[in-house]
Amino acid sequence: MEYDFRRIEKYWQQQWKDSGAYKVSNDAAKPKYYVLDMFPYPSGAGLHVGHPLGYIASDIYARYKRLKGYNVLHPMGYDAFGLPAEQYAIDHGIHPAVSTAQNIANFRQQLDNIGFCYDWSREIRTSDPSYYKWTQWIFLQLFDSFYNRQTAKAERIGGLTEQFEQEGNASHPCPGDATLRFSADEWENYEEARKQEVLMQYRLAYCGYGEVNWCEALGTVLANDEVVNGVSERGGYPVVKKKLRQWYLRITEYADRLLEGLERIEFSDAMKEMQTNWIGKSSGAEIDFAIVDDGEGAGDEGKKLRVYTTRPDTIFGVDFMVIAPEHELVEAITAEGQRTAVEEYIAYVKSRSERERMTEKKISGVFTGAYALNPFNGNKIPVWISEYVLAGYGTGAIMAVPCGDERDHKFARHFGIPVTNIIGAYYNGGEANPTKDAVLENSGFLDGLLMRDAIDEAINRVEEKGIGVRKVNYKMRDAAFSRQRYWGEPFPIQWIDGVAKPLPESELPLQLPHVDSYKPGPDGEGPLANIPEWTARRLETNTMPGYAGSSWYFLRYMDPHNDTAFCDRDVSDYWNQVDLYIGGTEHAVGHLLYSRMWTKSLYDLGYIGFDEPYKKLVNQGMIQGSSRFVYRVRGTNQFVSAGLKDKFDTDEIHVDVNIVDGVELNTDAFRKWRDEYREAEFVFEEGKYICGTLTEKMSKRLYNTVNPDDLVAKYGADTFRMYEMFLGPVEVSKPWDTKGIEGVHRFLKKLWRLFAGEESLPGRQGLVVTAELPTPAELKVLHKAIKKIEDDTERFSFNTGVSSFMIAVNELTDLKCRKRAILEPLLVLLAPYAPHVAEELWRQLGNAGSILDAAYPVFDGQHVKESAKAYPVAINGKTRAELTIALDATQQQVEEIVLADAAVQKWLDGKTPKKIIYVKNKMINVVV
RNA sequence: GCCCGGGUGGCGGAAUUGGUAGACGCAGCAGACUCAAAAUCUGCCGUUCGCAAGAAUGUAUCGGUUCGAUUCCGAUCCCGGGCACCA
């Protein structure tokens, strides 16, 4: 009886399906555990070997937790709205719903091959009306809410209107417009439209205007991603900034709680740091600088330029000001003589994406001709415009202190602006020094103060003078929440007399209408603007962005078929937070922040009982492709091996990695790969054709994708699962390499032989497992395996976990161990990693039911502990001897044993040791 | 440019809290079994010197802390991810 993985895996996958083995109930006496994968976007390219990496890890952990006695929720679904399906529809005329359904069917088939323990009865798709009904519903709750800064939570907008009626907005400053102040009387006298306009400035989901990358030729808005060198990636058309009406989520109101919440969740430090940096909380001051009226710029009189700075202590070192090209004062303060230059510069900046503005090393800018006055010493400071100052952050204007800020310094150097030194020797004239440790010079009333102390003093003086305020700032901006696209959730919003009105709940879901053309609407509107029935009702023509559905999907899995609520409160109280969330770091600041915000809002409004969605996050690394190249001599049909390519004039051509063994090309397969290569000739080196290699993104286009289906067909799902884990730590990115899979496959065959016997021959039935009592040596192997594998599984070190299995099986093979008392517990350990073969052997051992319901073996350590260990002794880190010391020896006992040793005494030669270092039960060092 | 990771044999990686670097696997070499092949098993396998025992050297580069550094600190180089409309 040989290891027939094809029969075994087919049988068990069917068995699991038929018996509903992974169906999970919403209440159980057992403790709950929720393991979630970031759901995939079902792309047309299907699953490649990178996708299952995280899924296998979570599957192992989910099965492990189930073995440990938990009621485990482990669902899967699809993030089914997205741009690629829409682009595919534009190119091929196939409706996104159709292509998405096909892609999902394909994904499902591929996932099923690998033997995951998902509860598919809970599958969700964000593009299902029954799902997005609740995405729309939650949006309406956000629309109907504001963030009460006094209670620090979201509350109903109705409560706010009541406040306004009683006392105006005195105790609720407007988050959308800090300068907005009104009394109860004024509020009463506002027209309804004005009232709605004001309320819009408070809503958590609100409508406003924002700049987008606009491509006139394509008639669409483009992502930064799709803009390359100022032109569209598709077609190379010009792209400019354009202001469009947009929906936003007021996530900035949650900035502090998003920061504070990080302390209560288990994300990696790197992840927390990324989110912290993204939120970018800083404290400093806003300071007004008066613009000098020098008669050149018309009407500069009384104009003030407000800057935000975290370093008000450096105010005497301000040598120039920089304002963003989009700043509202640009027009007004520009001097006549500079107007042309300024206009040219602004036109130039308009053509550049934000990405380019940040990336470019080149320094650019233009002088406005205007001057500001330093409020403390009256110095005239030139005001410049430069793209390195972004309109969206702070006030869109900075005071530049070249001696203390590197970018300011480079700018000053580039444009020959003299640098004032206020930090003495800390500034060497060559580069800026952002220290806070210097004692200030040339700084008026701040002279002699340590910079870190001067910050507070400067702010106090600014406030006393009434020219500014202490201010906390966030880098994070409100989240743009609309797309001028078709394939997304429609907003349940109707525009009546210019006022956004929510649709009544009874009209949800507002279904995405069928369209015949996916072309954009007029004036930058989405395709929905082309539908007469839609615009006749004045329905919102934007749709929601990709992250709408993914912001709350973890809740829907708990109660996926509920038609009266997004999730029953009792059910979400039971499942509560996601205990373990697995996905890539690329979502560090997008999805993960939005979904944290939605959770907080739903919590504030009383719909759920917890305000952080994910208790623990594990980031899986990205599997990159390892591309292979062949080199064709230009204009011929001749291909030269990589080592010889420099001797010819060649073109580098991506070749399918699946017809290359390591780096050696299978030339027959290559001839069959493409018709055009049928007659290919090869120039070999040492009888082989060697390919060039490069690590790059795994993509169909680069022919470097490896399809899991092929590997599963050849080696089986269990081998594939274990191999993906064996590749390396789940968290680390690495290029895919199929080379080692044979080793893991051999391991499973060896394991099988442990049960079925060496002499396993076709036709021979049954296992050779005996009921004999185990020896201490055999128990030691088992105990070591239990300890190691449990540790490895708990800390997500699945690669060393697989190694531990290999070691155990090798040792048991050497011991010729056939004993049930050893092999059966080992099988239980294996069940999360290689579920099919574990179930099969479990059954053949005569057990009824699933191995997942078996008792998890206990590490009693007896046979491992008994043995004493030899510890090396080092003297002054040099000479070494081995001593045998019991594992549980105390420090004093260790010292006695060490000093009693003849070799040690000889080395010491009568000297008294200064100290005996005994570290971590491993190393003893005697220092003389 | 800014933020976050990473760099260990021919290759993937191990070393869990600063303690014998290279576990486990792949590839390679030698051998056993076989008419032969496959499968399986055994031994060797960082580099240099050495018949060997062994010695020196070695975790991207340079420097530091330490009795001791792959691990901690500083600088540099290279690679990957993110930077707000890809998901």
Image (cartoon, coloured by chain):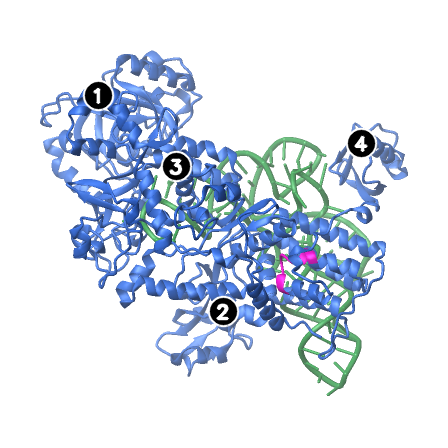
Chain colours: A blue, B green
On whether disc 2 and disc 3 are found on a single subunit, the reply is: yes
Q: CA–CA distance between discs 2 and 1? A: 82 Å
Contact, mark 3 vs mark 4 (Cβ under 8 Å): no
Q: CA–CA distance between discs 1 and 4? A: 76 Å
Relative to A485, A653 lies left or right: right
**Label 4 lies in what chain?**
A
Residue A24 spot, x, y in % from top left: 55, 53
Above or below for A679 versus A434: below
> For the residue labelled by badge 1, is the local secondary structure a helix, a strand or a loop?
helix
> For the residue labelled by badge 4, is the local secondary structure a helix, a strand or a loop?
helix
Q: CA–CA distance between discs 2 and 3? A: 61 Å
Give the residue number, with chain letter if any, for mark 3: A601
In primary-sequence order, the first of circles 3 and 1 is: 1
Q: CA–CA distance between discs 2 and 4? A: 60 Å
Amino acid type, residue under disc 4 in the picture: Gln
* Residue A829 belongs to magenta span: yes
Disc number lying in front (2 or 4): 4
Give the residue number, with chain letter if any, for mark 1: A184
Give the residue number, with chain letter if any, for mark 4: A891
Q: Residue, x 30% and y 45% (percent of image)?
A: A505
Q: Which residues are magenta?
A: A828-836
Give the residue number, with chain letter if any, for mark 2: A643
Amino acid type, residue under disc 2 in the picture: Gly
Amino acid type, residue under disc 1 in the picture: Ala
Quadrant showing the C terminus of chain A? top right
